[in-house]
Amino acid sequence: MRKIEYMQAINPDHKNASNVDPNVVGYAFGIPGLAVRKSWGTWQIDHIASGYRAFSNAHRTRKECVNAALLAQAQGPIDWTVDRETLCGSHLSDAIWHWKNAFLGHSRGPQFSKKTVCHDWTMKDLEIMLFDGLSEGLCGACGEVSGHHEGDARANHCPHCGKNKVSSALVLAGLI
């Protein structure tokens, strides 16, 4: 990997935008037009030409993030050297959607929504919980499932046994 410097896109409406340095250092990793860099404790993939974050999935190591991107590119190659307007065009939206799903580690084949990931939760269940912001959880003490927990819950109160041992489905599935 080769270290590269580029400019990140900064939202001018952000209240602290004037304090943010637009220069960032990332690593070219084999897909022209993309770079990997660490931001806020996790690794993300940036689109170099626009400076925007292209994809992130809470990867804790650079290797995990790069491997996910290389796998996605192998499954659905995209020319990332083009400008952002071309990438956001309707003719590429489906390809980028599939690329993102490969990067996130799952495929949207016919069995996607029926595949059980952990306990009795399917990928579709987990995806809905992720977007809703509330998750079901499993108690580590009594084994009961209860709802309305934060996605990152690891020691929530169990309404059945009263102990603080409920972990959210998203945590148990390794998505958070």
Image (cartoon, grey):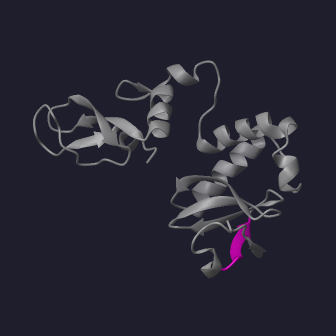
Asked whether 32 or 6 is in front, the reply is 6
Could you tell me which quadrant the N terminus lies in? bottom right
In the rendered image, residue 6, in percent from the top left (x then y), is placed at 77, 73
Q: Is residue 79 something one can see in this rendering?
A: no
Position of 172 with respect to 94 (left or right) is left
Q: Residue at x 66, y 56 (%)?
A: 66
Q: Residue at x 50, y 33 (%)?
A: 127
Q: Camera-side residue: 89 or 27? A: 89
Q: Residue at x 37, y 36 (%)?
A: 135
**Quick check: 146 above or below 1?**
above
Q: Percent x, y for residue 89? A: 85, 42
Residue in front for this viewpoint, 81 or 151: 151
* Residue 42 located left or right of residue 144: right
Q: Is residue 25 magenta?
A: yes
Q: Quadrant of residue 141?
A: top left
Total residue callouts:
0
36 over 127 or under it: above or below:
below
Which one is in front, 91 or 138? 91
Give the overall secondary structure of the magenta segment. strand
Report the magenta residues as a range.
21-28
**In this view of the protein, can residue 100 be seen by the observer?**
yes
Which residue is painted at 15% across and 34% down in the image? 159
In which quarter of the view is residue 8 placed?
bottom right
Q: Height in image: 116 above or below 170?
A: above
Position in image of residue 79 (x %, y %): 87, 49
Please check the rendered image and state whether residue 48 is part of the magenta-colored stretch, yes or no. Answer: no
Picture quadrant where residue 95 is located: top right
Task: State left or right for residue 135 relative to residue 44.
Answer: left
Percent x, y of residue 77: 82, 43
